[in-house]
Image (cartoon, coloured by chain):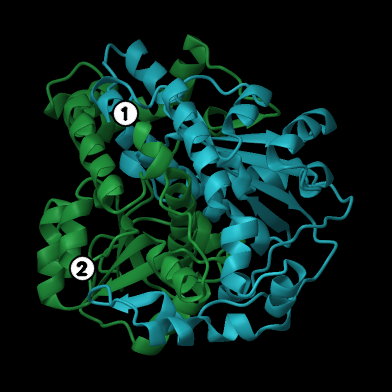
Chain colours: A cyan, B green
Amino acid sequence: MTDVLKNRTTIRKYTDQPIAAELLNELFEVACRAANTGNMQVYSLVVSQSATIKQALAPAHFNQPMVTQAPIVITFCADFNRFNQWCVQRDAKPGYDNFLSFMTAAIDTLLVAEHFCVAAESKGLGTCYLGTTIYNAQQIIDVIHLPKYVVPMITLTVGYPAETPRQVDRLPLEGVVHYETYQEYTPEDIDRIYEYKESLPESKQFVLENNKTSLAQVFTDVRYTKEANETFSSMFLDVLKKQGFFCQNNAKQ
Amino acid sequence: MTDVLKNRTTIRKYTDQPIAAELLNELFEVACRAANTGNMQVYSLVVSQSATIKQALAPAHFNQPMVTQAPIVITFCADFNRFNQWCVQRDAKPGYDNFLSFMTAAIDTLLVAEHFCVAAESKGLGTCYLGTTIYNAQQIIDVIHLPKYVVPMITLTVGYPAETPRQVDRLPLEGVVHYETYQEYTPEDIDRIYEYKESLPESKQFVLENNKTSLAQVFTDVRYTKEANETFSSMFLDVLKKQGFFCQNNAKQ
């Protein structure tokens, strides 16, 4: 089991082999065994298999080819809609139109996504997460018809692997694990933690290709720029408001 | 492997058996194999083992006994501090003081948490997630000294199980999985989806004990009230601002 977790790589190319409905069902049952807050299960999984829907979703994910090529695309959504409806039908007054409730649902959604991901990989499937889901959430809401109180959090493309990529680097553990309390990084710590990553041929290639003087500049100036981050921040906050998670007191925030 | 995922239960009571440092290291290495955005690894794990730190953390988690009883308590944190420092040291100007960057780090943090959780359980450990982390984030920040650009997202207590609880219920799959697009729930759907949960003796007991007329009211009036949610929403938004994730354009939001 630990091998599946330890040897994980992202798979972006898939064979034509479809995923059996029985397997998919089993994986969904297993995914829902992830821990969740108060057993409210405030999430929904939207499973897109039709070429039409996948094509409609693709632009929201900047047309990354996995979206149309994968046999299935799952959008994991924070969902208080179902729970709210249940409350109203049971003469209970839901108070979940706020930021904390959104965060609670988001957390539960991401735990389910990763539980699903590991389960799928343990059955020989390959997966790729798309972080673009929160960039263009409104587009996704429109395509898969998400009602108020439902927000797409992350997307997973799933299929049988048609590639066997090698594992990419990770920071040394001393870079990410702190004992007892957070240990601030000295400049020397930072140099040591990022040394291996910066030494990799592909990192040097990135720097050259982008005409930069450091790998960090590839991130700040090309891949994840301040301007794009600020634009997508505003867009996502607008989505949270529109979907009903910034009402009452929080509107003042 | 799937059995570990399928049979998961939350473990709240632990034996005195310590967790070997080698095993813990292996689990952290494995956890970092979770997918993450752009391989930035914008998260940190703070591992508290000392009785003093655990006792100091307990009030933030409403003194749930797992916090002091578990051999280790891990606070999984969204962390742009390390990445920002690296950028600055490499003559790159970080643009991550915004809501999107917080959400990106939060997502990556939760995927790592669940990857760790499954790995730990596959080695015979028991775990319990504490959602209270985002309720009292500032208290946690103070105890484990989290700097700007670091926000605690979720806490996991870990140890060898001293109990074997039965699995709790989950909604039927039709309640949480949608095909192609989101299918809105009719009142009849809601009745059917929640029927089993409402029929359970423990659910009926909850309703009785709390002097309510429905299980939903136990959630809205007792467990997750509008007032508490709004208070904790404001507190968590204040933390995000203080930790540096609502600067520039987003301040207007």
Disc marking residue A20: none
- The residue to which callout 2 is attached is B144
Residue occupying image coordinates x 49% and y 78%: B29
Residue occupying image coordinates x 35% and y 61%: B77
Relative to the observer, which residue lies in front, B222 or A248?
A248
Q: Quadrant of the N terminus of chain B?
A: bottom right
Q: Quadrant of the C terminus of chain B?
A: top left
Q: Chain of mark 2?
A: B
Image-based side of A158 in relation to A177, left or right: right
Q: Amino acid at mark 1?
A: Asn
Classed neighbour count for the residue bearing mark 1: other residues with Cα under 10 Å, few (<14), some (14–19), many (≥20): many
Image coordinates of residue B35 in percent, x first then y, are: 58, 62
- Residue B102, placed above or below residue A212: above
Image coordinates of residue B233 in percent, x first then y, are: 26, 36
Q: Secondary structure at mark 2?
A: helix
- Residue A109, placed above or below residue B114: above
Image coordinates of residue A171 in percent, x first then y, are: 52, 78
Q: Secondary structure at mark 1?
A: loop
Q: Quadrant of residue A160?
A: bottom right
